[in-house]
Image (tube, helix red, strand yellow):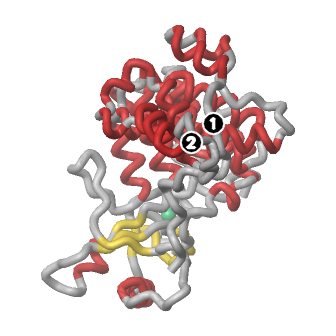
Amino acid sequence: MEKYQKHGINPLLISIATSQKLDSALRPTVAMLPSKYAKLVYKNMSVVNAEFPENIFRLTCQKCGKSGDYDLGTLVFPLRVAEPGDRMEKFQAIGYFRCKHCNAAGEWELSPRTKTMLAGKMAAAEAPKIAGDDSMAEVIFGEALIDKIFAPRWGSEIENYFFNKLAETPKDAYLWNRLGNAYYRGKRPELAVTAHEQAIANDSGQVESHFSLGKMLVECGELELAATHLRQAVAASCQYKYLSAYDLREIIVAALEILLTVYKQSDNKINMLPKPNEQAIIQQGKNQIAATAMLDFDIDAENRETLYPLAEVYLGERFNELLPAQRATNNQQAKRKAVWPVAGKTNKQKPAKKNKKKKRK
Ligand SMILES: [Zn+2]
């Protein structure tokens, strides 16, 4: 097996991204991916994948008849089915994997032993948790749906779903972003960055892809590169139409939070906020530039809440979509007046933190 070929890659990914015809029997390596970051992320795979469970099971490929151990990633079991045995037939595996022997995907046979082990996994997940057990959920109950209609059985079916759409519109940045998210949840960050890079190549204002790239690059220790993408996510957010103003604000806050950490880790060398040239691309309003230049915000690294007013500046016009009661900008000003009355400065008590960290159970 060649270097960078441990995990199967669909040659169609390269075909669609580069609009070149490739032999469908080709077994691509990571080095062949049209991507700047794929190799880097591949080398740091275990760190980037840390948030996902490992569910290794033996499956048999129906194409070539050979068996192998595969990481099924997050498992989703249906809540209720008529026949209890059906739950084993209808579970979903979000992990992305292909046959180690013939590179096929999606046609798997489960041996009775694998089924027994999966049933055990499901039963363990259904049992009440032992107190103090903070381990991550390896199993989810319910149904994973794409576009509210498609229930994929395997991670590779999610890829197929987006490939079918991308075959029609290969320059659709939003589709590439969603494919990137699917690969990421499928525990294939090297494929995820490839898709996200396609997204930003087709639309430099693809906020979610910039954010995802930034997040993964931070995990790889590439602070400078990560910050570039995170700042672009922040700068482009005012013109991003695929998220509600609330979700968009959450992304900006999350990006600012990482940028603040990177800023500190780099001894204040890596800029936290978008530079004027990064903003120029998007033509930010005068207000945003003025506000960020003045940096008139009380930012407390320990308190996420303090980043909201700054995030709202970057929402631009979309700030108006937030209900007045939900705006941090107004609320904070009001709160400040109440807690620190101008007349009596003796009261040094800090305002109560809104989002107290949840107590660990
Ligand atoms: Zn096979």
Q: Name the residue carrying label 2.
A: 306
Residue 133 versus residue 180: which sits nearer the camera?
Answer: 133
Measuring from the top left, give residue 295's x and y in whole percent.
Answer: 65, 24
Relative horizontal placement of residue 352, taking residue 226 as reference (left or right): left
User: Within 10 Å of the Cα at label 1, are there few (<14), some (14-19), or many (20+) other Cα atoms?
Assistant: few
Query: Farthest front residue?
Result: 343
The residue lying toward the viewer, choosing from 314 and 177, is: 314
- Disc on the earlier residue, 1 or 2: 1
* The disc label shown at residue 298, or none: 1
- Residue name at image x 54 percent, y 84 percent: 133
Quarter holding the N terminus?
bottom right
- Mark 2 lies on a secondary structure that is helix
Residue 238 at x, y percent in the picture: 45, 22
Quarter of the rendering containing residue 120: bottom left
> In the image, residue 360 lies at what x, y percent?
54, 76
Q: Is residue 137 above or below residue 287?
A: below
Look at label 2 and name its amino acid.
Thr
Residue at the left extreme? 82
Q: Few, some or many C-alpha atoms within 10 Å of disc 2 (few <14, some 14-19, many ≥20)?
A: many
**Residue depicted at x 66% and y 19%:** 294
Q: Identify residue type, mark 1.
A: Asp
Residue 12 visible: no
Q: CA distance from mark 1 to mark 2?
A: 7 Å
Which residue is rendered at x = 47% and y = 30% of the image? 312
